[in-house]
């Protein structure tokens, strides 16, 4: 595996030719039937979902869509979902639970959309609901971060039994640009932020957030989309095998504990003594 | 445009003079003598403002309270027992100067981090209570906030108690990186289990409830109450203004706006809060079947 810095990886995930879910889905899944709409407000182009087969097994796929050109980006809002996108994702996840299908979430967003309409329709509530429902969803959930995993907008689709990341993908509490602008009031220090935020797949394995790293071809996924799809496919096979053999109660306990253990604090320190 | 997704919501509505010195105008006033409402700019004597429960007498903006003040006006005298009072945060991503900053804040505020949890009675009803304190890093959620809130919900689930949570937060704690994002999942998971056990959770949104806290446990209450005029939202106002390139109306992301949008059940004034909570807790008490009183 390469030893690129976080900011070099940022360049790779932002590469114009970086494959998106629209490239991967036909290569990894068969008979994909896309489903639309959240049943309340509308259909969000930034989240795509449906039912299909993975090596013969019926699965539900829910994916965040980034555009490959301006036209596509207009339709998918540059990969930034509105509340109805999260509500569509949740509807399809509940449907998967009903029919005992595993859920595969493909995450690729710089974050949930920030706008007047998104606030009015409850962006915060939509993400919160998604997190809490996925936490108790009675079917296996595998999430894979393909490129950017930006903050709550990514987390809403990354509450899962196993989280994998493509080798060059990043996952962060906020975009590096946002991080720089909040902490140093200077968005141009993005690269510097990138390198201290601990956002690479290796960092996140160390922090117990990511469970698995999926290799990319030399130089990045854009150099060989088919090979990358095959690597993703191999990972999904193995992960499903691991999760499908567990009882649902055991699965849900493990899912709860996967998140439960993250946090670094200390107790019973004598009055105000640091570290 | 996503810049401040979880940003500390700037002190737009701040009545807390400690945090917003640089934004004060030249016409500022001695801070311990007069209170100038950040919402309506009305000026009153500090004493009158204090006697009014830190509510602006002109527009009824409910200014921020410390967790200690909040507990004092909410629970039955002498009934509060604190949980995990000694827990302090480490530095999970080795963020420069984070340890020193925390120590300085602990010294300054007397708090160990941005939340106080415990159990108490409210008008005779037993409950677990969670109170966030915006004086500590704008009550951003890091390891300690996440862990204490999770434990409070777990305690309530085990002991079959309701939870009342006074939320206030600028969002996730940037200095703890991804670990702070995971606290959203951790707290929401604990809320989900409390919910599945059929127990009551009342969220009281106070100024400001934003970012990752809005997008996790704060929005998951069976009942969501807000104090008048407080800021409630997901994204930072400046980010949205930057996106749409125009100024947003004042009431955008206010409690009243969120009530209209359907995300808040009721707006309750501070002076009626204790009584309202007492009634709601009693109304949901099913085990003894004693709901008529």
Image: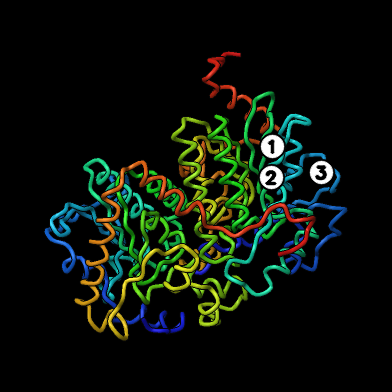
The C terminus of chain A appears in which quarter of the rendering? Answer: bottom right
Q: Which residue is mark 3?
A: B50
Residue at disc 1, secondary structure: helix
Residue at disc 3, secondary structure: helix
Percent across and percent down for residue B210 are: 56, 54
Disc on the earlier residue, 3 or 1: 3
Question: Residue A61 appears in which quarter of the rendering?
Answer: bottom left
Density class for disc 1 (Cα within 10 Å; few <14, some 14-19, many ≥20) is many
Marks 2/1 in contact by CB < 8 Å: the verdict is yes
Q: How is the image coloured?
A: rainbow
Percent across and percent down for residue B251 are: 57, 51
Q: Chain of mark 3?
A: B
Q: Which mark is residue B62?
A: 2
Disc on the earlier residue, 2 or 3: 3
Q: Which residue is mark 1?
A: B270
Question: Residue A34 appears in which quarter of the rendering?
Answer: bottom left
Q: CA distance from mark 2 to mark 3?
A: 11 Å
């Amino acid at each position: 595996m390469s030893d690129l810095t976080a900011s070099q990886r940022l360049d790779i995930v932002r590469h114009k030719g970086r494959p998106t879910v629209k490239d991967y889905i036909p290569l990894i899944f068969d008979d994909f039937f896309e489903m639309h709409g959240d049943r309340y407000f509308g259909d969000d182009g930034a989240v795509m979902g449906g039912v299909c087969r993975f090596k013969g097994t019926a699965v539900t796929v829910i994916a965040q869509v980034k555009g490959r050109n301006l036209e596509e980006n207009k339709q998918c809002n540059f990969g930034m979902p509105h509340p109805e996108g999260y509500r569509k994702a949740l509807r399809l996840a509940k449907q998967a639970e009903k029919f005992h299908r595993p859920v595969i979430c493909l995450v690729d967003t710089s974050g949930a959309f920030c706008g007047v309409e998104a606030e009015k329709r409850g962006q915060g509530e939509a993400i919160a609901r998604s997190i809490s429902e996925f936490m108790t969803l009675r079917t296996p959930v595998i999430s894979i971060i393909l490129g950017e995993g930006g903050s709550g907008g990514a987390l809403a689709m990354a509450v899962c039994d196993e989280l994998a990341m493509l080798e060059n993908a990043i996952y962060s509490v906020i975009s590096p640009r946002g991080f720089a602008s909040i902490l140093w009031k200077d968005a141009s220090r993005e690269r510097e932020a990138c390198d201290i935020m601990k956002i690479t797949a290796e960092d996140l394995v160390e922090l117990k957030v990511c469970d698995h790293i999926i290799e990319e071809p030399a130089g990045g996924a854009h150099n060989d989309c088919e090979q990358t799809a095959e690597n993703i496919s191999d990972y999904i096979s193995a992960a499903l095998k691991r999760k499908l053999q567990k009882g649902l109660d055991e699965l849900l306990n493990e899912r709860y504990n996967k998140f439960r253990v993250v946090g670094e604090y200390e107790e019973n320190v004598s009055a105000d003594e640091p570290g | 445009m996503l810049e401040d997704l979880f940003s500390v919501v700037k002190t737009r509505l701040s009545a807390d003079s400690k945090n917003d010195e640089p934004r004060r105008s030249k016409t500022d006033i001695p801070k311990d003598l007069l209170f100038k409402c950040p919402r309506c700019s009305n000026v009153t004597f500090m004493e009158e403002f204090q006697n009014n429960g830190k509510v602006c007498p002109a527009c009824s903006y409910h200014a921020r309270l410390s967790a200690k003040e909040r507990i004092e006006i909410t629970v039955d005298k002498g009934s509060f027992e604190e949980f995990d009072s000694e827990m302090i945060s480490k530095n999970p991503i080795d963020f420069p100067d984070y340890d020193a900053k925390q120590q300085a804040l602990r010294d300054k505020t007397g708090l160990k981090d941005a939340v106080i949890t415990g159990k108490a009675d409210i008008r005779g009803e037993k409950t677990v209570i969670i109170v966030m304190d915006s004086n500590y890093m704008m009550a951003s959620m890091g390891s300690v906030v996440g862990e204490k809130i999770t434990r409070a919900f777990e305690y309530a689930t085990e002991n079959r108690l309701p939870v009342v949570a006074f939320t206030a937060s600028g969002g996730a704690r940037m200095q703890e990186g991804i670990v702070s994002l995971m606290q959203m999942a951790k707290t929401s998971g604990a809320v989900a289990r409390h919910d599945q056990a059929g127990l009551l959770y009342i969220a009281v949104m106070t100024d400001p409830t934003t970012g990752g806290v809005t997008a996790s446990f704060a929005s998951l209450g069976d009942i969501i109450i807000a104090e008048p005029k407080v800021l409630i939202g997901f994204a930072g106002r400046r980010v949205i203004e930057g996106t749409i390139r125009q100024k947003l109306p004042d009431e955008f992301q206010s409690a009243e706006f969120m009530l209209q949008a359907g995300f808040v059940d009721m707006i309750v004034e501070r002076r009626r809060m204790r009584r309202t909570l007492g009634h709601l807790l009693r109304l949901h008490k099913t085990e003894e079947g004693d709901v008529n009183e």
